Image: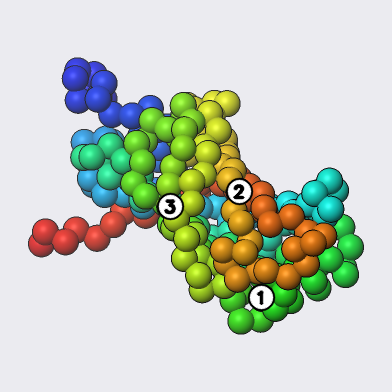
Amino acid sequence: MPSGSRRESSSRFLAAVLCVLAAGFVPARVARADDAPAGTMLALDSTRSHADFEVKVLWLIGVHGRFGQVQGSVSIDRVRGTAVADAQIGVEMIRMRKPGYETWVKSAEFFDAQHHPQIHFVSDPFPLGELQAGGEIGGTLRIRDIDRHVTMTLEPSACPEAIAYTCAVEASGSIRRSEFGMRSRRGTLSDNVDLGLTIYLAEKIPEPDRTQ
């Protein structure tokens, strides 16, 4: 693969993606950087990715839960050196320590899973380098069909050379549940809800060539 200024200007994340391609996750015809399209979509690995939340009772006792399946993608713009994350998080299959807690947080009082079975997060475009170095990214979070702009913090990667498959992208943030229509039990339940995302990437899907 050519070395030179073009390779030096590419992010380390792209290099990691190319290593995955060379390992056989996608056809060999896109295994070279010169052959890869400027726009590339990387699917999330829903079998390993997960999302968690925690809310405090009496502002002291943390009650933890794990959402259902996480699906989505990370779109790479190699020309601009940016990425956009798009994640859909299942609410109907929440798992908690007690079945009674699960029933409660899925009820209309909290996430209202019957009418709003998914949480949707779409990030603003952010520099590819933040996938290794960490940093803050903004984005639109939809809960109960209410959109709010939030900020998530990306943690630095432990092994950036393999982040495309073997290492997780971890992000965390906090929301106010009252801003998403969840206003009950404010005397005993904290308004803040902590969110955590652990994302693994899977196969690479080239976007269609719209120039033809």
Where in the figure is residue 45, as x and y percent of width and height?
55, 52
Mark 3 vs 2, N-terminal side: 3
Residue 94 in sight? yes
- The residue carrying pointer 3 sits among few (fewer than 14), some (14 to 19) or many (20 or more) residues within 10 Å by Cα, namely many
Tell me what residue is drawn at x 47 percent, y 33 percent.
Answer: 135
Kindly identify which numbered label has been placed on residue 139. Answer: 3
Mark 1 → mark 3, Cα distance in angstroms:
22 Å
Mark 3 → mark 2, Cα distance in angstroms:
13 Å
Amino acid type at circle 1 is: Ala
Image position of 132 with respect to 48: above or below: above
At numbered mark 1, what does the secondary structure look like: helix, strand or loop? loop
Image position of 165 with respect to 204: above or below: above
Would you say 133 lies left or right of 170 here? left
Q: What residue sits right under mark 2 in the picture? A: 174
Where in the figure is residue 177, as x and y percent of width and height?
63, 61
At numbered mark 3, what does the secondary structure look like: helix, strand or loop? strand
Amino acid type at circle 3 is: Gly
**Quadrant in which the N terminus is drawn:** top left
Mark 1 vs 3, N-terminal side: 1
Amino acid type at circle 2 is: Ser
Kindly identify which numbered label has been placed on residue 113. Answer: 1
